[in-house]
């Protein structure tokens, strides 16, 4: 399958007609590089963990640059083009020459995907037909709420009724996946039910609900919390319950992040498949697996089913992929053994990891584990259960191989 990603550039908030009230990029200032899996071994900080994670680009690219890059990318590939995805730091709906951009990409006659838009840059309902006529096949559209006043107040959409008309029309011909950050007391409860009912009636394929985060331990790693001072935040468990309660009421798919996708049973759908877990390699060595506080108990259950005798150690941070060096610094080293495995995507530079895990004078090795052990709702939205299970099998097989390669064998204890 040949896919082309067209990066239009831009920065969140800046190329979005202003920040949405809940935007995680609000208040981000000059943050020091975090360190990550892409950094060179001798240098903490690379383009990804310095600029990419903040999606900090110089503004939208001009149309000519996009056209030139797209042409160059097209020339370097063979075979049919199966999908063109528009992505970028800014919101595509705010791209200044959007009509020309879509006509340009539409002329390639491949299905178009818009990976993310808030729609607040569109002020004319005719945009929906422009998109349909140029081959749009899938779009992820932030709705927040279908109450226009709330959209206006929290997303700063100057023409919320137009955005809703566009969603309605797109739902007739395109796979529309809606998204909403849930702010307790603002767009939950009856407002959320009304939003889901409206989208369901329009024919949306699904909605991803995102638990709002307002503090560092909930995942704000850019030093910019609180995003909305005083705004309450749901616990992960109460958010999961919200998803369970609402999902049966509508035909479209409803899932949540960080938990959960009830249709697939993910994250960690593998826990409901003991026969599959039996096919994983056996854990034969001791290693301290570090994870976020949400994933740790799930990972521990899978590893115990595969023979591990160790606990998975949660850090204070809830989301594993957002673990930083501070989380490792705060680990109780009395609880870990000689081999420490952190999540593959953690924002920790490897030489700093080595230093931090040996800072009490005991030599330990710190290893980066697999990038993904499961699919969150954003990943699983377009996937089948078998695809998610295959992803989890691959992730856990890799983790167990890492444990067995770098850990201390149980049979020597
Ligand atoms: S549209 Fe998205 S990226 Fe832009 S300000 Fe709103 S939440 Fe942030």
Image: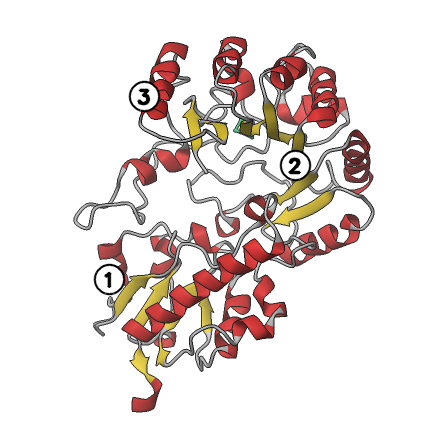
How far is the residue under mark 2 from the one under mark 1?
A: 39 Å
In the displayed structure, does residue 71 sit left or right of residue 319? left
Q: Residues within 10 Å of mark 1 (few under 14, many from 20)?
A: some
Proximity of marks 1 and 3: CB atoms separated by less than 8 Å? no
Return the x and y of residue 106 as percentages of the image width and height: 52, 17
Mark nearest the camera among 2 and 3 is: 3
- The quadrant of the rendering that contains the C terminus is bottom left
How far is the residue under mark 2 from the one under mark 3?
A: 36 Å
Proximity of marks 2 and 3: CB atoms separated by less than 8 Å? no
Q: Circle 2 sits on which residue?
A: 180
Residue at 66% x, 31% y: name it.
176
How far is the residue under mark 1 from the one under mark 3?
A: 41 Å
Q: Earlier in the sequence, mark 2 or mark 1?
A: 2
Return the x and y of residue 354 as percentages of the image width and height: 24, 62
Q: State the residue in front, 80 or 294.
A: 80
Q: Where 229 sits versus 274, above or below?
A: above
Q: Earlier in the sequence, mark 2 or mark 3?
A: 3
Mark nearest the camera among 1 and 3 is: 3
Q: Which mark is residue 72?
A: 3
Residue at 52% x, 76% y: name it.
278
Q: State the residue in front, 224 or 99.
A: 99
Q: Circle 1 sits on which residue?
A: 354
Return the x and y of residue 100 as percentages of the image width and height: 50, 9
Residue labelled 2 has its Cβ within 8 Å of some atom of ligand 1: no
Q: Where 107 sits versus 3, above or below?
A: above
Q: State the residue in front, 60 or 138.
A: 138
Q: In which quarter of the image is residue 194?
A: top right
């Amino acid at each position: 399958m040949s896919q082309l990603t067209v990066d239009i550039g831009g920065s969140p908030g800046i190329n979005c007609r202003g920040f949405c009230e809940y935007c995680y990029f609000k208040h981000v200032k000059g943050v020091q590089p975090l360190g990550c899996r892409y950094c060179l071994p001798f240098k903490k900080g690379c383009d990804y963990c310095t600029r990419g994670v903040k999606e900090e680009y110089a503004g939208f690219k001009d149309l000519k640059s996009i056209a030139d890059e797209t042409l160059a990318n097209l020339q370097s590939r063979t075979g049919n083009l199966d999908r063109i995805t528009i992505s970028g730091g800014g919101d595509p709906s705010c791209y200044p020459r959007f009509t020309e951009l879509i006509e340009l990409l539409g002329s390639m006659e491949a299905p178009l995907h818009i990976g993310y838009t808030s729609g607040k840059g569109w002020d004319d309902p005719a945009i929906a037909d422009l998109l349909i006529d140029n081959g749009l096949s899938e779009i992820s559209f932030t709705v927040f709420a279908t109450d226009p006043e709330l959209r206006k107040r929290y997303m700063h959409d100057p023409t919320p009724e137009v955005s809703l008309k566009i969603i309605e029309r797109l739902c007739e011909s395109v796979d529309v996946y809606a998204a909403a950050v849930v702010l307790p007391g603002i767009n939950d409860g009856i407002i959320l039910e009304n939003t889901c009912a409206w989208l369901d009636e329009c024919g949306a394929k699904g909605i991803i609900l995102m638990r709002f985060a307002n503090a560092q331990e909930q995942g704000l790693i850019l030093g910019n919390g609180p995003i909305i001072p005083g705004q309450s935040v749901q616990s992960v468990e109460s958010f999961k319950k919200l998803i369970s309660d609402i999902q049966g009421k509508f035909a479209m798919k409803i899932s949540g992040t960080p938990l959960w996708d009830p249709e697939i049973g993910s994250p960690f759908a593998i826990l409901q498949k003991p026969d599959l877990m039996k096919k994983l390699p056996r854990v034969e060595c001791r290693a301290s697996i570090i994870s976020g506080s949400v994933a740790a108990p799930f990972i521990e259950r899978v590893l115990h089913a595969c023979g591990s005798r160790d606990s998975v150690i949660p850090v204070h941070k809830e989301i594993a992929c957002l673990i930083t060096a501070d989380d490792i610094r705060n680990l109780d080293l009395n609880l870990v053994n000689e081999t420490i495995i952190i999540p593959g995507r953690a924002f920790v530079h490897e030489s700093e990891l080595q230093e931090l895990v040996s800072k009490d004078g005991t030599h330990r090795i710190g290893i980066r584990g697999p990038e993904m052990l499961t699919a969150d709702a954003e990943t699983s939205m377009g996937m089948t259960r078998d695809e998610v299970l295959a992803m989890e099998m691959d992730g856990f097989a890799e983790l167990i191989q890492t444990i067995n390669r770098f850990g201390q064998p149980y049979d020597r204890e």
